[in-house]
Amino acid sequence: MNISFKKMSEFSVEACVQLWIEGFEDYLLPMALTVDSFIARTANNELSMEHSIVILVDDIPAGFVMNGFRELGGRKIGWNGGTGILKRYRAQGIGRALMQRNLELYREHKVELATLEALSPNEKAIKLYKYVGYEVIEEVTLLQNNEVITSTAIESSGDHNYTVTKGMGREVAKVDFHLTLPTWSNQWQSVKDGESIIVRDGEEVVGYALFKHVYDKDGNLAAIPLFQCEARPQHVNELEIYKLLLREVYGPLGHACRRSTFNLRKSNPIPIQILNELGFTTYIEQVFMTRPMEN
């Protein structure tokens, strides 16, 4: 078995899409993409075809890993934005060879921290990532609710007056307790047309949220995904701040649409508890994994 590697940029878009589809065959979630949706995913997540790898067995494509690079907190971050092995090549060490070559690529480009997400039930993939040095640093959850919200779980107590400012997604980066390492897709750079809610108590910022509104072809509100939701740590009115943030993000509550969270961190249970009370249910859970690189 002769193993070699090529850049994904050396293949046509159509070939890359077919490779993606076959690489995710029998996956836990539907992952099929069209040419247009593949291009959109690549662009929206700032993935680089030039720095993504295809592994070949006897000159036949057997799998791939897609990569994105980004400066975050003064460090160069590498993100594995999708790894797939064709079904007939699985359980033959192909994934291990691919991941080891990918880490070499990160070293060549002076990546300081490697990151990825994996579905929590995908034990084989998580085992592979751990084998090459990744560690789980966070569990994240995807919640959703498609109904009109009638619960009183986020009603205000009326005991405090906060100032709410709405703005563009990038405004969250200015908050002093902004998450230093959210998952790649939850970083404001990845949330195209992102919006922010900033909550202040006087001059002090006490909470923020990053989200977006998605509209259908007729201009009707179709979905509200939430990417980050944080109150100032150990704030005396933490619960009230989260209720206010969720009211502002998901309103108007009387309108039915797909309200969801994307990779909300489970180490911050308060907003998740509130959302559960509002009727949100778990769609899927993932682990966020990182690996420091030795350059």
Image (cartoon, rainbow, N blue to C red):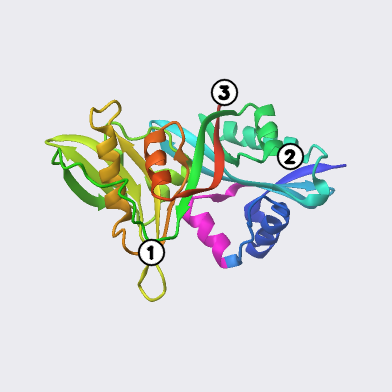
Secondary structure at badge 2 equals: helix
Give the residue type at disc 2.
Gly
- Which span of residues is magenta-colored? 36-53
Q: For mark 2, does the 10 Å Cα neighbourhood hold few (<14), some (14 to 19), or many (20 or more) residues?
A: many
Q: Name the residue under label 1.
A: 256
The quarter of the picture where residue 17 lies is bottom right
The quarter of the picture where residue 270 lies is top left
In the rendered view, would you say 118 is above or below 24? above
In the depicted view, which residue is nearer to us: 133 or 154? 154
Q: Mark 2 to mark 1: distance in Å?
A: 43 Å
Q: Mark 3 to mark 2: distance in Å?
A: 21 Å
What is the number of the mark on residue 95?
2
Q: Name the residue under label 3.
A: 294
> Residue 158, image x and y in percent?
16, 42
In the rendered view, would you say 124 is above or below 221? above
What is the number of the mark on residue 148?
none
Q: Residue furthest right?
A: 1
Residue occupying the point 47% across, 55% down: 44
Residue occupying the point 69% across, 36% down: 123
- 54 sits to left or right of 109: right
Looking at the rendered structure, the number of numbered marks drawn on it comes to 3
The answer, for residue 110, to whether it is visible in the render is no
Q: Residue furthest bottom?
A: 218
Secondary structure at badge 1 equals: loop
Q: Do the residues labelled 2 and 1 touch (CB within 8 Å)?
A: no
Residue occupying the point 53% across, 55% down: 42
